[in-house]
Amino acid sequence: MKTVYFVRHAKSSWDNASIKDIDRPLNERGLRDAPEMGLKLKQLDAKIGLIVSSPAKRAYTTATYFAAALGISPDQVVTEPRLYEAMSEDVLEVVSGLSDDFDTVAIFGHNPTLTFIANLFTEDFIDNVPTCGVFRVDANVASWDQFGENSGRLTEFHFPKQFYH
């Protein structure tokens, strides 16, 4: 069994139009939601062995807050350029290329791609994965290279407003 927690980055700032999109930081709400949702995953007993993040500042910062909450070493947080401005196929390709040393991973990325991916793995329609939203996909496969839209199902979906706002 392989498990992926897909996480949309926390709320980001649009205050400074001169900042490149990839460099946009989290805003106040994002800085609050990221550690809280990381702790929520810890309470749900998520056993994540590797975190792979988009290189965008807002995604990577979200990933580091989750890592701290989950007690994951900073060297287990890696960036993957293909996750920035990715299509769903790109994200699934990243997952299928992961090391089988890890059974449970977290992927930190962006919308609309993550909402599209969530809908690949559920019969229920998910209109939007909100900022700092997390969904879990369990796949009955032995290796990541077998992971794909027909191999797993969405088993959890959480977002900050369920718990904190």
Image (cartoon, rainbow, N blue to C red):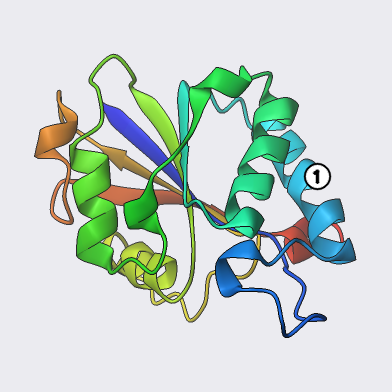
Q: Residue at x 40, y 27 (%)?
A: 104
Expressed as whole percent of the image width and height from the top left, the position of residue 22 reads 56, 65
The image shows residue 93, relative to residue 48, as above or below, that is below
Q: Where does label 1 land, which residue?
A: 36
| Front in this rendered view, residue 59 or 42 | 59
Quadrant in the picture for residue 2: top left
Q: Residue furthest front?
A: 18
Percent of width and height locating residue 15: 82, 81
User: Is disc 1 placed on a helix, strand or loop?
Assistant: helix
Q: Visible in this render: residue 100?
A: yes
Q: Is residue 59 above or below residue 105?
A: below
Q: 54 or 45, which lies in front?
A: 54
Residue 123 image position (x, y, % from top left): 30, 68
Label 1, residues with CA under 10 Å away: few <14, some 14-19, many ≥20: some
Q: Quadrant of the N terminus?
A: top left
Residue at x-position 37% and y-position 51% = 81
| 1 displayed left or right of 62 | left
> Which quarter of the rendering shows the C terminus?
bottom right
Total numbered labels placed on residues in the image: 1
The reply to whether residue 48 is in sight is no
Q: Can you give x and y, in whole percent of width and height, for residue 76 in the image?
A: 51, 22
Residue nearest the viewer, comparing 9 with 14:
14
Q: 134 above or below 40? A: below
At a point 86% along the width and 58% down the height, the residue shown is 164
Q: Residue at x 38, y 40 (%)?
A: 4
Image-based side of 17 in relation to 129, left or right:
right
Residue 87: quarter of image: bottom left
Identify residue type, mark 1: Glu
